Amino acid sequence: IPAYQNAAGLEECLRALEGAGAHEIIVADDGSTDGTAAVPERFGAKVIRLDRNSGAGAARNRGAREATGDVLLFVDSDVVVAPDTVARVTRLLEERPDVAAVFGSYDAAPRAPGLVSQFRNLLHHFVHQQGEREASTFWAGCGAVRREVFEQSGGFDTGDYTRAIEDIELGYRLRAAGHRILLDKDLEVTHLKRWTLTSFLRTDVLYRAVPWSRLIVNRRLALDHLNLKPAHRASVALSLVLAASLALSPFAPQLLVV
C-alpha cells in the first residue's frame, strides 16, 4: 500500500485488508507528515518510510522489495477491499497459471458525496466494467501480479510515469513480454476519494491524458483497451465538436443545431 498524507483513509483500508485475511501487509509511507506512518502499527502491518515523497510507483517498488509472498497485491490507501478480495485473487492465480496479473475496478457505490466525486468514481467503474477481460494495461488501485514476473519486469516506472500512469505503463511492458493480464469485473473495491472539479480535471488531463498520449505515441501502442476504445474516442471527438459549436454559435446560430 503506497500512502501519502492519508491517515484516515489508510486506517479504513487496513481494517478491510485485515478482515479479508491478507497474509502480509506492507505500507510504504511516501514521505507523509500528517501521522500516516503511525497508522500501520495499530494493525500489525509493516511500515517502510521513504525519505522523501517520490511518487506511488517508487513507494510500491520499495514495499514490494520487502514482501515475502509469491503474489504481490497492490492496494491504494484510499481503497476499501471486499471481504473476499484476497481469497478471490489467490484462487484465480492458483487456477490460472497462465495468468501473470489480475486487477479489478471500483464498485458502483462510491463513498464520497457530491456530483463530481460520484461521477468520477462511477466513470472508473463504468470503464472497467465495459473493458475487455484480456487486458493490455494494469491497475494498481487493486491489482495483483506474480512476484517473479514483477521482478523480471523491473517493477513500476520511477521516471516519467511514477506520479501518473505507472501501473498502465507496467501493464504494457508485461504484455510486450508475452504475459497475460486479466480484468476481473467481479473484483470490486470501494473508493473513498473525494474529488473536486479542479482535482478531477488536473488528474485526468495532466496525470493521465498527457502522459498516456505520450506513451502511446512514443511506443506506437495499439488503441484497443479500456477508455481508448473506438466508441470512447468518438465521444471525445463529439465533445470537441460540441465545444466548438457552442463557442461559434453567437456568430453562426445555426451551429446550435449541431
Image (cartoon, helix red, strand yellow):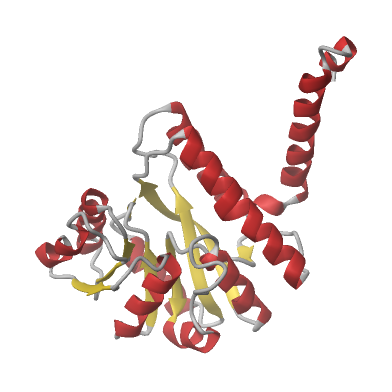
Task: Locate residue 106 relative to residue 135 in the image: left or right.
Answer: left
| Picture quadrant where residue 91 is located | bottom left
What residue is at 76 percent from the left and 65 percent from the top?
217
Quick one: which residue is furthest to the front in this view? 52
Residue 4 placed where, x, y %?
31, 59
Task: Locate residue 251 relative to residue 165 in the image: left or right.
Answer: right
| Picture quadrant where residue 240 is located | top right
Q: Is residue 90 visible?
A: no
Q: Is residue 102 visible?
A: yes
Task: Locate residue 47 relative to residue 167 in the image: left or right.
Answer: left
What residue is at 48 percent from the left and 80 percent from the top?
155
| Picture quadrant where residue 108 is located | top left
Task: Locate residue 124 relative to residue 252 in the image: left or right.
Answer: left
- Total residue callouts: 0
Residue 207 placed where, x, y %?
55, 54
Residue 237 placed where, x, y %?
79, 39
Image quarter where the C terminus lies is top right
What residue is at 83 percent from the left and 20 percent from the top?
248
Q: Looking at the image, which is closer to me, 212 or 189?
A: 212
- Judge whether 224 appears above or below 93 on screen: above
Q: Looking at the image, which is closer to me, 129 or 54?
A: 54
Residue 251 placed where, x, y %?
87, 13
- Judge whether 243 appears above or below 88 on screen: above
Image quarter where the N terminus lies is bottom left
What residue is at 22 percent from the left and 53 percent from the top?
7
